[in-house]
Amino acid sequence: MTSNLQKKLIEKDLIYGSQNYSPLPLVLNKGSGVYLWDVDGNKYLDMMSAYSAVSHGHSHPELVKVLTEQAQTLAITSRAFYTETFSNYIEKLSKISGFPNILAMNTGAEAVETAIKAARRWGYFSKGIKENQAEIIVADGNFHGRTTTIVGFSSEPEYQRGFGPFSKGFVTADYCQSNCECNNICEKSINSIKNLINENTCAVLVEPIQGEGGIVTPKTGWLKQLRDLCTENNVLLILDEIQSGLARTGKLFAYQHENIEPDGLILGKALGGGLLPVSAFLSSKEVMNHFNPGSHGSTFGGNPLAAKVATKALELIYEDNLIENSKEMGAYLKDEIAKLNMPFIKDIRGKGLWLGVEIEKNISAKKICLALMEEGVLAKETHETVIRFAPPLIITKNEIDWAMTKIKKVLTDFS
Ligand SMILES: *Cc1c(COP(=O)(O)O)cnc(C)c1O
């Protein structure tokens, strides 16, 4: 139950804060590894990881160490100068990802905006699309952030209401649903994309798995077909892996489940090691060379502090074995939830440590999350009917076993 101290702090938020979120009634003041503590000292297992920004665990000691050292050495310079940390960071990110060129930003939405600008310039200057005619195909149910341009092509009415007029140049196709009727050929989604492609199309921008959309996981083969379609039509395939990338799905990038390569990749969230906002757009020289001085930028993008933390965050993916652990523990957690055999669970989907548990409409996912919170497990619903489990990727089997006793208890109470 929410204590008086927590109630007082929540009250201040209600008085002084813009109410643009609807948090669970819990006030935190400490985190370490997979655990969080509230202001009264109660301990919780974090199974949502700040929407996958905390894949390395809270306040990872080695990340805190490089953050502190770098803060004492050189933190912010702006990009008016070259810095040692930035040069070394983009070299590392390029080598790990295989993308030749990187543009550094801070938040996810900024990196998506960067991708949109890159795609349009490529469309005009490489593909030869007529001025101001470029189109980008996006998917129904997408989530790419909250700028006015980005919400302009959202399919969520509440993201748009009262924020228009919106940018032109975006058209919406069907996303692939794993439970759709079109066997293995994904014809509904692929055909709808095919129908929208024309001479003005510069890019298709999608998430390989839709996170905020409800961990919507396309059929195997869909991404490969999409890759082929884009190649055949001279259209860039740009993947938003802000949430799915960097080991979350049990591969470094979710697209590696299908052995394809996109033309552009958007990263954020876990790139900052759970300490700082760090994002990036990655692509080829051909696409990136269309940016010239003045065409894009960010005061804080690629700053030494962020660059140092992101470099270490990338190294730790391997040193802490996050890819393997995500794959193994994700499969284990999925099995354990399936074994509960709860009649009101309609679907368990996702890859690695990124699971969406879809429940019947008459049960509220938010109420289940509240009940889990009372038991010391933090999860967050997406939409009304999906419970998201996305713990830090360092979670152990014992910790999952402990969480499962709580999940079982709560779900049993609801059935
Ligand atoms: C979180 C997220 C974003 C937006 O990132 P911000 O850092 O909140 O701007 C964009 N795309 C996807 C897929 C995301 O999950």
Image (spheres, rainbow, N blue to C red):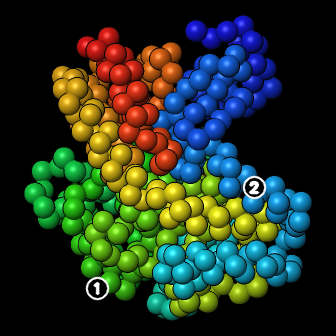
The residue identified by callout 1 is 232
Residue 309 falls in image quadrant:
bottom right
Residue sitting at 39 percent across and 47 percent down?
353
Q: Is residue 187 above or below residue 356?
A: below
Task: Classify residue 70 as left or right of residue 354.
Answer: right
Q: Amino acid at mark 1?
A: Glu
**Which quadrant would the N terminus be assigned to in this image?**
top right
Q: Is residue 188 above or below residue 361?
A: below
Quick one: label 1 or label 2, which is nearer the N terminus? 2
**Which quadrant would the C terminus be assigned to in this image?**
top left
The residue identified by callout 2 is 65
Q: Is mark 1 within 8 Å of ligand 1?
A: no
Evaluate whether residue 155 shows in this view. Answer: no
State the image coordinates of residue 9 (x, y, percent, origin top left): 76, 19
Evaluate whether residue 257 shows in this view. Answer: yes
Q: Is residue 191 above or below residue 345?
A: below
Residue sitting at 69 percent across and 32 percent down?
30
Disc 2 element: helix
State the image coordinates of residue 249 (x, y, percent, origin top left): 38, 55
